[in-house]
Amino acid sequence: MGVIWLLIVGAAAGFLATRMMKVEASVPATIAIGMGGAVIGGLILRALLSVMGMFAGLIGAVLGALLLIWLWQTYGPK
């Protein structure tokens, strides 16, 4: 169940992050961005997750995905 939840949250977070950053990405790339963001956000916002519950996980995933997109746009292939 954890992998399915990661895919669902990753898809939602990736979709929100790509729209916020105005990035056109394929569905698999969007899910991968969201999953990467979920991992990054989960590490950064662990304390917030324990206080606010699963909603904080989505916030952390979106923030992590935004960071990942920014890093990709800044340092990725041109």
Image (cartoon, helix red, strand yellow):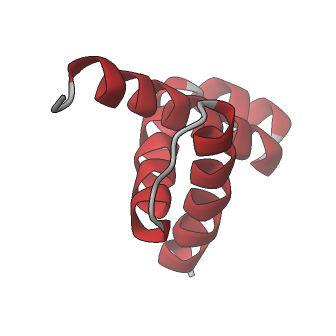
- Compared to residue 19, the image places residue 74 above or below, namely above
Considering depth in this image, is 58 or 13 the residue closer to the camera?
A: 13
- Foreground residue, 7 or 15? 15
Task: Report x, y in % for residue 27.
Answer: 49, 68
Q: In this view, does 3 lie above or below 73?
A: below
Question: Which residue is drawn at the image coordinates 30% and 17% (left, top)?
Answer: 74
> Residue furthest toward the left?
77
Q: Which residue lies furthest to the top in this view?
A: 74
Q: Is residue 72 left or right of residue 61?
A: left
Residue 69 location, quadrant:
top left
Q: Which residue is drawn at 57% across and 51% down?
A: 14
Residue 63 screen position, x and y as percent:
60, 29
Instruction: Please state the total of marks drawn on the protein image.
Output: 0
Q: Quarter of the image for the N terminus: give it.
A: bottom right
In the rendered image, residue 13, in percent from the top left (x then y), is placed at 63, 49
Q: Quadrant of the C terminus?
A: top left
Judged left or right of residue 69, residue 45 is: right
Q: In which quarter of the image is residue 39?
A: top left
Q: Which residue is drawn at 71% across and 27% down?
A: 48
Q: In which quarter of the image is residue 12?
A: bottom right
The one of 73 and 9 positioned closer to us in this rendering: 73
- Residue 74 is left or right of residue 45, and the answer is left
Residue 46 position (above or below residue 61): above
Please report the residue visible at 64 percent of the width from the left and 25 percent of the height from the top: 47
Where is 26 relative to 49, above or below?
below
